[in-house]
Image (cartoon, helix red, strand yellow):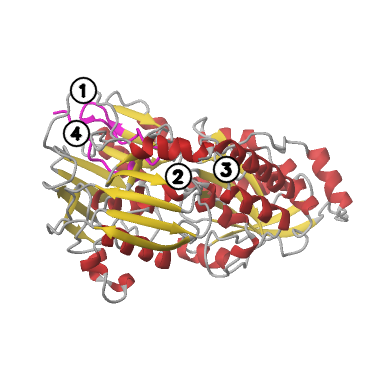
Amino acid sequence: MNKYFKMAAGGAAMLAATALAVPTAQAEPKQGGTLTMIYRIIAGHFNPAIASGTPTGIPGTQLFAALIRYDDQWRPQPYLAESWKIADDGLSVQVNLRKNAVFHDGHPITSEDVAFSIETIKANHPFKTMYGPVTKVTTPDKHTAIIHLSAPHPAIELAMSSQLGVVIPKHIYGEGNIRKNPRNSQDIVGSGPFKLKEFKPGEYIIMERFDDFFLEGRPYLDQIVFKKMAESTSRIIALETGKADLTAFASDPQELTRLKKSKHLTLTPDGYSAIGPLNWLAFNTTRKPFDDKRVRQAIGYAMNKKLMIKILYSGFAKRATGPIHPGSVFYSGDVNDYAYDVAKAKALLDAAGLKPDADGIRLKTTLNFIPGGAVWKRWSEITKAQLKKIGIDVTLKASSDFRSWIKTVAGHDFDMTLDSVFNWGDPVIGVHRTYQSTNIRKGVPWHNTQQFRNADVDAVMMKAGLENDLAKRKALYAKMQKMVVEEAPIIYINASPYHTIYNHDRVGNPPVDSIWGTSSPMDNVYIKQ
């Protein structure tokens, strides 16, 4: 057995069923109480098997259980699967289910449901690489599922965790078009610690304790009330006054600065390492002059990224230097960080044949940015000002709404755009999609919308995605990061300064002790008073 699979199968993967895979409690948890969580968006449905995104994933991981969960040290732990074993050749995974697990309607959770769930995710989820190598799932008995792979797939464990690998009931979703199934949003029959009580589209979700959850004594909470609160001032007031207990994915520097002063609130960036959020400037590499990497590199040198982060995020954000998030186990800082250098930027533009005219203008171009948020508008304005210093005249283009921006960028109808993209744990799942030449899919957002093509990068990612040895895999991704940064289809600015904010006087075991944060089950969270 190779080194990587010894770690996975011989360690956490075969933990006894008594190891409940939960963080050490801060104090003796109490049963009962309601957690009120506020968020910017309420999704239209909560079935993570057919959709990505945190608005679906946060409630979805409460309603549906995954096979595996992760702690904050990237260690896989048992959840719906009491144990699992990856074969020595990496071509199969045996999953052993808990025998006491039932769906919210009392039906036992069986290996047939696992097989159906994986097949459904593979067919419907936008992250095709998660279960891409899966050829079939066999079910030798009711509590054993064997996942067969066409090639070694080191990302399989992360694919079986959090909102990526939920188990849904075959007897509910097995007939008809699952995308149109009304039980994606109403009368949900899940497998998780909470069941759906009430959903008012665009306003709130109420989830209540599932008394027959497979982990005895869990969850501690009676209810989770998940409310939409899109406006920053409203969120601030709700948290300050105690009307809300918790929010997540908070990144507005004004919001963070003010709430940091509240004595009853804790702000923490913990819990986002698998989400891996990065902010960047992306180029349409098929449009002239951005088909010349010297032009892209010049823009990288012209952007004073440290100053931008200071101005935009008031010290809350960390610098990003490449395609993998700094919190990932695969991150490498051994890349060109494009330190601010106007002279070098001008020299590269000269070499690319972009000489300044009588007015000092070398190039006129456009920059699209995501609407709805002061940070994005300000970021675009700072970028425009910095590029003017090297003779690039930028016209800013704000879409009418978020969907319009997605349509523009996914349709490849842009020169440059500001964007925020998630790594989703394993590079195979969330990083390859941005750079793989075979993943250029017009009309699909966040799937190599830069239209970047580099056969050498493709080859390294392919090899890394098949490599079972963790150390060798890290080395391959270090090489990939250096190559991509050199090609500069994207200029990396910062890791999004996401924070979870919670009332520490009320909330015990806050959901920050996992690499998935609030996109993981909150069965261990409790109300102190």
In the picture of the structure, the residue carrying the numbered disc 2 is 275
Look at the image and tell me whether residue 401 can be seen: no
Residue 224 - label:
none
N-term mark: 3 or 2: 2
| Element carrying mark 3 | loop
Amino acid type of disc 2? Ile
N-term mark: 3 or 1: 1
N-term mark: 2 or 4: 2
**Percent coordinates x, y for residue 31 in the rendering:** 11, 34
**Percent coordinates x, y for residue 190 in the rendering:** 21, 56
Amino acid type of disc 3? Ile
Kindly report the secondary structure that dominates the magenta region of the rendered protein: loop
In the picture of the structure, the residue carrying the numbered disc 1 is 27
Residue 262 quadrant: top left
N-term mark: 1 or 4: 1
In the picture of the structure, the residue carrying the numbered disc 4 is 526
| Element carrying mark 2 | loop
